[in-house]
Image (cartoon, helix red, strand yellow):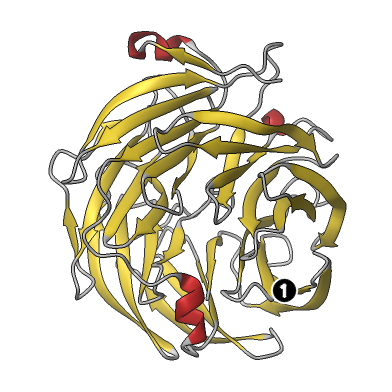
Amino acid sequence: MRQIAVLRPALSWLLAPSLLIVLTIAALPSAVAAPRSVAASRGRSGAVYTMTNAAGGNEVIAYRRSTDGSLDEFGRYATGGEGTGRTRLSSQGPVTLSEDGRWLFVANVGSDEISVFAVRRNKLRLVDVRPSGGRDPYSITVYGDLVYVLNNAGGGNITGFRVRPQGRLDALSGSTRPLSGAAVTDPAQVAFTPDGRSLVVTEKATDIIDIYSVDGSGLTRGPRSVDVSDPDGTPVTPFGGDFTSRGQFIVTEAAAGEIGEAATSSYAVTRRSRLTTISDSVRDTRSEVCWTVVTPGDGYAFVTNFGDGTLSSYQVAADGSITLLDAVAAVTSPGELSVRDHGLSEDGRFLYAIDIHSQMVHGWRVGADGGLTEIGAFPGLPPTVAGLAAS
């Protein structure tokens, strides 16, 4: 069983590879958006969004989703910022929808900015571009009117914003806080818990969980550091995660890219932002596992294995424990460094993933038993593509 220990903040920089960070929210955001399941019941058109991550000018690529799950590109929209131009952006959540589906947030990693689009039927409208509060914004998370951005450069940081009713962002003065304190943390994702009381950040270069308290204005205090490393020193490399509706965190472990060592763990995050292990390193036998999504009914989790172009599936029990369902639940580009970010439609019926080898969005129908049935691959992606959000 993995050891979890509380550390003094001054010692956090001594610890090595791989991290999760949890920020406790002392007060909920002032305005809570409708859950995505409610938004879906209103009949809003389905769509899939990704970004080009182009160095000469980042763009959102928008696809319309038909009732059979097939996609049709309906537009490209300049973000007003720049991407990196690199083929690998190692993060989950650089393209994120608000809970009510009204706003699309995009990380411009190359220009250190985040963009906000108003989502309207069959079109997007750019409403704001703001500095991210650091360098290399990698991931964005939203709960109600509170937005947090994870910046990757150096030791990394988090910065908070409030969303105005018109979609413009107000930076929270004093909200920028460092991560674990290590010189290099290489964080991958920031994500709110379902109740909005905690914020989790995964760091690939450390094995620590930092806990911050947040006051009613959204400002943080701390951190309190928690070590979740393996006792034998084997790299864990936590990467992308998703929450069940009960607040259990399902997170992938890339194991420093070792072939066949990819795994996934699950944790319970308490109201006091303490982390306990539920299932420890359940291997999927694949390589370089990265991104995670959990079905709306909490029964299944899907992870993408960048190292060999496959997706694996896990069954999720009511207590948050996980078991491997299918090591190769789906394939995009067999044996290639390929499949990356993925996302589920709001109703959980369809799963989509971007593939930098085929340069397509691949889609599957999700069965009641967690099985995936291919529905097609849809063109239009550049090799630099990153991030995916679905409605």
Please state which of residues 176 and 315 is positioned toward the viewer in this rendering: 315
Q: Tell me, yes or no, if residue 212 can be seen here.
A: yes
> Left of 294 or right of it: where is 185?
left
Q: Quadrant of residue 260?
A: top right
Crowd tier of the residue under label 1, counting other residues whose Cα lies within 10 Å: few below 14, some 14–19, many 20 or above: many
- Image location (x, y in percent) of residue 88: 58, 49
- Image location (x, y in percent) of residue 8: 37, 10
- Image location (x, y in percent) of residue 309: 79, 54
- Image location (x, y in percent) of residue 164: 18, 68
Residue 174, placed above or below residue 104:
above
Badge 1 marks a residue whose secondary structure is strand
> Left of 233 or right of it: where is 269?
left
Write the residue at 80% across / 32% down. Answer: 261
Residue 248, placed above or below residue 144:
above
Write the residue at 77% across / 30% down. Answer: 258
Q: Tell me, yes or no, if residue 136 can be seen here.
A: no
> Left of 217 or right of it: where is 221?
right
Q: Quadrant of residue 23?
A: top left
> Left of 112 or right of it: where is 50?
right
Which residue is labeled 1 in the image? 363
Write the residue at 57% across / 51% down. Answer: 242
Write the residue at 65% across / 72% down. Answer: 348
Please state which of residues 116 and 101 is positioned toward the viewer in this rendering: 101
- What count of labels does the image hold? 1
Label 1 is placed on what type of residue?
Gly
Please state which of residues 121 and 196 is positioned toward the viewer in this rendering: 196
Quadrant placement of the N terminus: top right
Q: Quadrant of residue 113?
A: bottom left
